[in-house]
Image (cartoon, rainbow, N blue to C red):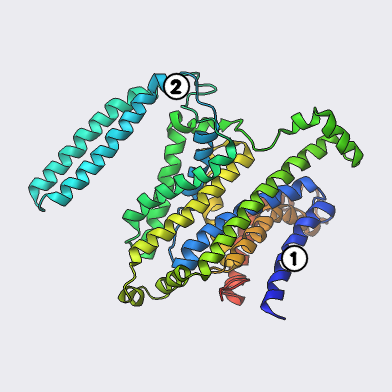
Amino acid sequence: MTDTMKHSLLFAAVGLLIVMEGVTDWGFFSGSWNSSLVILNMGLISAIMALGVNLQWGFAGLFNVGIMGFTALGGLAVVLTATPPTPGAWSAGGAGVVMAMVMGALTVVSAVTVTKMMPKGRSRALVTIAILVVGFVIYRALFDPAIGAIEEINPAIEGNIGGLDWPVILSWPVGGLLAAGAAWLIGKTALGLRSDYLAIATLGIAEIIIAVLKNEDWLSRGVKNVVGLPRPLPFEVDLQNDPAFVDRAAGLGLDPVLASTLYVKLGYAILFAVVLLALLWMAQMALKSPWGRMMRAIRDNEVAAEAMGKDVTRRHLQIFVLGSAICGIAGAMMTTLDGQLTPGTYNPLRFTFLIWVMVIVGGSGNNFGSVLGGFLIWFLWIKVEPMSLELISLLTSGMAEDSFLRGHLMENAAHMRLFTMGLILLLVLRFSPRGLIPEK
C-alpha cells in the first residue's frame, strides 16, 4: 500500500467516525447530526490550532507551551472588534486609557534607549530605575481613574469599553494580528532561551494573559464574561420565524427547529473549512519553498545553519509569530462559534496539552498529519466519556444498582478522557514515534 493510499484511508476513517455519529444510534454514537456537526466544527478549529503549533515545532523545533494565551487573545479580538462600543465608555475613560498606554510605551522605550546609550555602570542603573518608577507612577495616575469610570457604567451588563462594531468575520484576522503582536514581544525576550526554559516562559506568559483577561473588567468583563457576541450566521430563532425557511424545511421533511440548528452548524462548518484549507495550502507552499527547507535545516542543526550565514534567532522569531497568529485566528473562530468570551474556561489541559497530543499523534513536521490529529483526538476527547459509561455499565451489569463500586466507577467515567489521551500518546510513541502521517 502506498503512503498516499494509507493516509487517505486514515482521513476516511476519521470522516466515517464523524458520519457514524450522525447516522448511527448504538454504542457510544448518539445518532444525532447536531452532535456530529458540533464535533466537526470543533475538529476544524482544533486542526487549525494544531497546524499553528506544527509550524513552530515541526518546522523549527520551538517548544511553545503558551498556546492557551494566544488562543485567548484571539477570543478577546472578537470582543474588541465585533461588539458595539459601550455608550459613554469612551467619553468616561477612553482618553485616559489611551494616554496611559502611550505613557507606558514611552516609559519602556525610554528605559531601553538609556540602557543602549549610556555606558554600563551605576549611573545607568539609577537613571533606568528612575525612569521606570516615574513612568509607572504617571501610568497608574492616568489608568486607574479611567478604568474605574468605565467599569462603573452599568456593571451588571456592560462595565467594559466595548468594541468597534465591525462584522464578526473581520475579528478572525484581527485575532491573528493580536496574537502575532504578543508573540513578537514574547519572542524578542524568550526565544534566546533553551527549549525547556522557553516552554516555562511561554506557559508563564500565557497564564499572565489569562490573568489579565480575568481581572481587567474594563477590557473583557473579567469573569463576568461577554455574552451575546455577533454571529456571521442568523440565529436559529430568526430562521424558525422565517416562513420561507419553514416551507423549505417542510419540503425536505425536517422539523423547523432541527433544520435551523443544522443550517447554522453546517454554515459554520463551511466557513471554518475554507479557513482551514487556505491555511493548509499556505503552510504546504511554505514547507516546499526555500524558506521551508531553510527552517527545517535550522531545526536539524542550528550551528551548521548559522555557519552558512542564516540568522537563526530572526527566523525563529518569524515562525513563532506565524504559528501564534494561526492559533489566534483559531481562538477568534472558537469564540465566534460559542457566542461568548469566558476567560475562566481557558486552561492548559484543553488549550495546550490537547493540541500537543494532536500534533504528536498526527505527525509533527507534516501539515496533513496535524490536521488528522486535530480531528481524531477531538473526536475521542468528546466521545470517550459516553464510551466509558457504556463499557462500565456493561462490566457492572451484574452488580446491584446501589453497589458502591458501580457508583464509584460511573461517577469517575469522565476521567477516562485523560487516561485515554495518555494511552494513545504512549501507543503512538511506541509503535509509530513519528506520528500517524510522519514527515517525509
Label drawn at residue 89: 2
The quarter in which the N terminus is drawn is bottom right
| Location of residue 159 in the rendering, given as x and y in whole percent from the top left corner | 48, 24
Q: Nearer the viewer, residue 395 or 358?
A: 358
Disc 2, SS: helix
Contact (Cβ within 8 Å) of mark 1 with mark 2: no
* 94 lies above or below 325: above
Residue, x 49% and y 49% (percent of image)?
Answer: 68
| Location of residue 389 in the rendering, given as x and y in whole percent from the top left corner | 74, 53
| Location of residue 99 in the rendering, given as x and y in whole percent from the top left corner | 31, 29
Left or right, 109 with reference to 167: left
The quarter in which the C terminus is drawn is bottom right
| Location of residue 185 in the rendering, given as x and y in whole percent from the top left corner | 35, 50
* 263 lies above or below 415: above
Neighbour class for label 2 at 10 Å: few (<14), some, many (≥20)? many
Q: Nearer the viewer, residue 16 or 84?
A: 84
Left or right, 9 with reference to 228: right
Q: Label 1 belongs to which residue?
A: 12
Instruction: Check disc 1 and give the amino acid type.
Output: Ala
